[in-house]
Amino acid sequence: MIFVTGDTHGIADIEKLRRFSEETSNLTKADYMIVLGDFGGVWSEATLDSYRALYEAFPFTTLFIDGNHENFDLLESFPVEMWRGGKVHVISSDLIHLMRGQIYELGGKTFFTFGGATSLDRYRRVEGVSWWRRELPTYEELDEGIAALRERGGKVDFILTHSCDERALWYPPLRSGGQLFSTYPENRMLSWLEDNAEYGHWYFGHYHLDGDLTERKTVLYREIRRIL
């Protein structure tokens, strides 16, 4: 089985995973829980072992894409390996970072991943301590993803990102309550996917909301959905 959910922020929003694991039977390490960025479980040397132990204690294997609130210096200190067709950082056998612009094969389906976003609260964070410039994806990473997609005829079953494309910003629930999220470079980058890629369903996090924008696009935060 494969599940997806939104940001966990280290241990700040880990309770949803703990509750899910207690309420769901027959879970094994062959099942995957995919966190859609702002994972935060690889945040500092001081908390790395304790956070890792908490995630490893779950009955499933945790996969995550990066968001904007990640310690990229620490995350990128792990060696890059190939896993299920794409590049990853293996934090442990039960905890794996799915890198930007990669395509993985899981459960007979293809997953395109592209993390990163702009931190709106960076003005009150400290560079190299609680904020890193690597939060913003690069066009080189986008080009790598485009090349991977073109090798597959531009088609994947799932797109998993932290942020979303520009058009998505105009759909409920992102427009709920009269709010209008600003457009940032990552939104423009991800618009290439909406305009050019063929996909079955697109899931993203970042906005601390849950809901379906369309029949094929979903934002997640607290909700956990089974997709396979």
Image: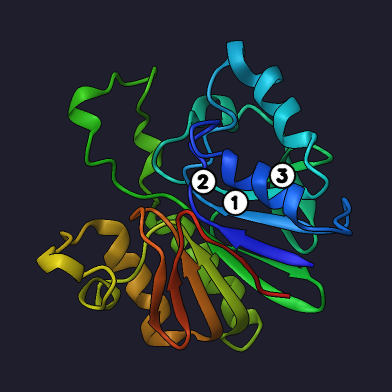
Q: Is residue 167 above or below residue 46?
A: below
Q: How crowded is mark 2: few (under 14 residues within 10 Å), some or many (20 or more)?
A: many
Residue 181 picture location, percent across and down: 18, 60
Q: Which numbered disc flags the more N-terminal residue, 3 or 2?
A: 2
Mark linked to residue 66: 2
Horizontal relation, residue 147 to residue 178: left or right: right
What element does badge 1 sit on? loop
Residue 172 versus residue 84: which sits nearer the camera?
172
Residue at the image position 41 percent from the left and 36 percent from the top: 69
Residue at the image position 32 percent from the left and 58 percent from the top: 186
The answer to the question of whether label 1 and label 2 lie on touching residues, with beta carbons closer than 8 A, is: yes
Residue 190 picture location, percent across and down: 37, 69
Callout 3 amino acid? Ile
Q: Residues within 10 Å of mark 1 (few under 14, many from 20)?
A: many
Q: Which residue lies furthest to the left in this view?
A: 178
Callout 1 amino acid? Met
Q: Which numbered disc flags the more N-terminal residue, 1 or 2?
A: 2
Residue 38 picture location, percent across and down: 47, 43
Say which residue label 1 marks. Answer: 99
Say which residue label 3 marks. Answer: 96
CA gap between label 1 and label 2 equals 7 Å
Q: Nearer the viewer, mark 1 or mark 2?
A: 2
CA gap between label 3 and label 1 equals 9 Å
Q: In which quarter of the image is the C terminus?
A: bottom right
